[in-house]
Structures are given as structure tokens and as C-alpha cells.
Image (spheres, rainbow, N blue to C red):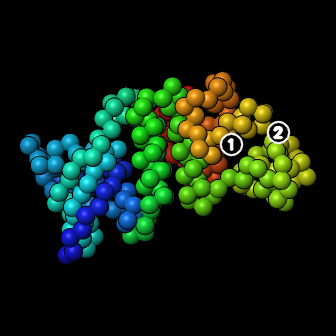
Amino acid sequence: MALYREQGVVLRTYKLGETDRIVNLLTGGRGKVRAVAKGVRKPGSRFGGRLEPFSHVDLQLYEGRNLDIVTQAELIDGFSGVREDYVLSACGSSMVEAADFIAQEGERASRLYVLLLDGLRQLATVPRWPATVLDAYLLRLASVAGYHPQLHACAGCGTPGSHDVFHLAAGGVVCVRCAPNGTRPLDAQALSLLRSLAASQWGMETAADQRVRRTVSALINSFLAYHLGRSLKAWELVPR
């Protein structure tokens, strides 16, 4: 078995036997890693509380046939404030659930890894609207997964312009000629917020009202579910 070292974010954990735990990790170099932390549930375990969901850790592992084995774990950031607050935790759970679904074992995932860390760090600042930070993360996650939403030209014919009908199957906004019959346009505020979140803003200082934020949130969730083929369970728990 080869020994290796990686930094990663704990996505989720499972009990194994009486004292062990299986840990799903997202790393930049190896993508998703599934490993066993032996004895982690024993009182006085050397891993302590380092291998909890959201934790950013520096690890030493042995390669195993089916599961790798954690031999050392140093905590970089436990994101305890995120884990201990219901709203922040619900948003963080949606982030790691989406990352766990997207990431593949053995495939480099540096963009996804950096995006997840950035999202958790934004939540740790206790933003005014945590759900909007989650929405920004999910929109960028879609891009990392290969489903970048077209927001500045028609996703159907490519005509540039500020089109205001969003079509899930087309992958973004569409012009009046490409818009299916019966579709309704987004209002200007919703379209503006959507573009801001897809760019570089996390929605921390958005002036959009609650109705607009909810509209955009539902649209992003539907877009992600349509293109990934599944909905996020934790998303339903996020207060908006």
C-alpha cells in the first residue's frame, strides 16, 4: 500500500462497526476519497473531532483496495460556526451534498475543491442571506460540472442581448423566437441577481428583496436538478 498526503474537506461520514467511521473527502488532487478512520468513535481517539462534516483537514492516508485508511489528520479549519448554526449548517450541507454527487474518485477536482472551500468560508462570515450564498455556489458548481448557464446571449440561437426568458432545457436565457409558447420572462431584478451570482459576487450585499431572492433560488435549484438528474435533499431544509 502506498502512503500519500492530501488536504481535503469532509463531505459526509458513516459509522463502521463499533468504533470506526467511513469518511468521504473532497480533495483537489485525487477528487473524492473514501477512507476509513479506525477507532475514531472511541473516547480519546487521536482524531478527536477533526473528521466532522465541513472540516478542512490535512491528512496522511494509506491506499487500500476498496477504502483508504486515515493514519493522521490535522485540522486546518473546523468551520464549527457553520456546523453549529441551523441555517448555516443547512446551507453547508447542501454544498457538500452537491460536491459529493459531482466529484469522482481518482479524478483531479481542484476547481470543485476551491469552490467548496470558498463557499464554506463565505458562510463562516455569517452573511445576511446565507441561502443566497448557497445559490451562488450552486450556480458556479453547475459551471464546474459542465453546465454553465448562458445569461448574456440566447442559449438557443446565440443571438447576443439581454434576453429575459430562462429555459432549463436550453441551458439559459433565450430570445423571443426561441422561447417556447407560454413561457414567462424573468423580471429585471431576478435576472440581474442571477447574473451577479454567476459572476464574482456571493450575494452578500445584494439589494434584492426576499421575493426576488426566492425566485432566483428556485430557478437555480431547478436548473441544477434538471442537468444533474437529481435534486438536493438538504436544499429543502434551507430557510428562505
Q: Quadrant of residue 146?
A: bottom right
Q: Neighbour class for label 1 at 10 Å: few (<14), some, many (≥20)? A: some
Circle 1 SS class: helix
Q: Residue at x 64, y 25 (%)?
A: 207
Task: Name the foreground residue: 16 vs 165.
Answer: 165
Outermost left residue: 44
Nearer to us: label 1 or label 2: 1
User: Could you tell me which quadrant the C terminus lies in?
Assistant: top right
Where is residue 151 drawn, in percent x and y?
A: 73, 49
Residue 179 appears in the figure:
no
Q: Neighbour class for label 2 at 10 Å: few (<14), some, many (≥20)? A: few
Residue 218 left/right relative to 63 = right
Q: For mark 1, what is the residue?
A: 195
Q: Which mark is residue 184?
A: 2
Task: Name the foreground residue: 2 vs 180.
Answer: 2
The amino acid marked with disc number 2 is Arg
Q: Which mark is residue 225?
A: none
Circle 2 SS class: loop
Q: Quadrant of residue 191?
A: top right
User: Could you tell me which quadrant the N terminus lies in?
Assistant: bottom left
Task: Name the foreground residue: 215 vs 161.
Answer: 161
**Separation of marks 1 and 2 at Cα, in angstroms:** 18 Å
Q: Residue at x 82, y 45 (%)?
A: 163
The amino acid marked with disc number 1 is Arg
Residue 118 left/right relative to 14 = right
